[in-house]
Image (cartoon, rainbow, N blue to C red):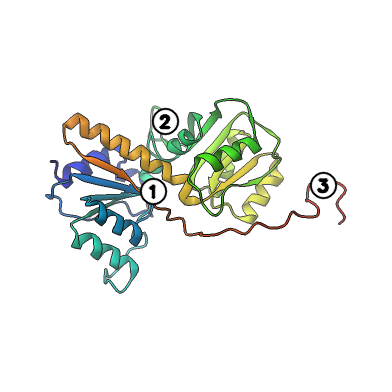
Amino acid sequence: MPRLSEVIAALDALWPPERAEGWDAVGPVCGDPDAEVRRVLFAVDPVQEIADEAVRLGVDLLVTHHPLYLRGTTTVAASHFKGRVVHTLIKHDVALLVAHTNADRADPGVSDALAGALDLRVTGPLVPDPTDPAGRRGLGRICEPDRPMTVRELAARAAERLPATAQGIRVAGDPDAPVRTVAVSGGSGDSLFDDVRAAGVDAFLTADLRHHPVSEAREHGPLALLDAAHWATEWPWCELAAAQLDTISDRHGWGLRTYVSRTVTDPWTAHAASAPPLVTTNDPGAPN
């Protein structure tokens, strides 16, 4: 069996910590570097439900996309939920490793997994990493659909292929507009609108879109926007990451067993649909 330090070194080669944003908190959170690793669980959020799942599965390493302590801390007391997570993991000899923006920028990374879940062919990064001579790394991805489709069809595919959430998929734009090129970005994406416009794509699928940035983006042109749940856009990476570790394990003869959590940790739990509006803002006959 490999030691924890060996498994982390292999995962760091996939998602080098130095490529994370300066504000990020990636890497190991807890765990004995000399401990043996037999089972590994991948998940998006390091919340108590996931820590409990790791214990039930008897895993030795939990790998999450989101950091536990993004802004640092001065205590891991179990009186707070983050401290309870740390206590649960340490008490049951479960290590925790975070791969966040370093996994976003990787090739393949979070947005590649999102594109793959939607059968979109990646043609390149949305925001290229200037340190990558091959031009494959970076934030987001520019893609082409596997067949001609409309915005409505792309939204329906995202609703079908991504994990089910209370939010579903919101659309801003003409549902019947054709989609020839798509930009995707797992997680919060409205900071990338300038890059999306520069790419000249027909649609942008991401998460956490806010009113004012969306309103301004719509005023710039016919770009269609598709807003999915943050957790749902990043969950496909867990399957990709587990498959990558499986390949490494086979190559080294480690015999690791990997798991992907299907526990829904999206914080939104219900959705009540509004009644259809009487008029829409793009209706030329609508009263002022």
- The quadrant of the rendering that contains the N terminus is top left
Quickly name the residue at label 1. Answer: 262
Quickly name the residue at label 2. Answer: 136
Q: Are marks 1 and 3 in contact (CB under 8 Å)?
A: no
The secondary element bearing badge 1 is classed as: loop
Image position, residue 151 (x, y; %): 65, 37
- The local crowd at label 3, few if under 14, some if 14 to 19, many if 20 or more residues have their Cα within 10 Å, is few
Kind of residue at badge 3: Asp
286 to the left or right of 44 = right
- The local crowd at label 1, few if under 14, some if 14 to 19, many if 20 or more residues have their Cα within 10 Å, is few
109 to the left or right of 285 = left
Q: Is residue 129 shown to the viewer in this render?
A: no
Kind of residue at badge 1: Arg
Kind of residue at badge 2: Arg
Q: CA distance from mark 1 to mark 3?
A: 42 Å
Residue at 20% from the left image edge and 61% from the top image edge: 90
Question: Which residue occupies the extreme top position in the image?
Answer: 147
The secondary element bearing badge 2 is classed as: loop
Between circles 1 and 2, the one closer to the viewer is 1
Question: Which residue occupies the extreme front position in the image?
Answer: 56
Image position, residue 142 (x, y; %): 52, 33
Pointer 1 or 2: first along the chain: 2
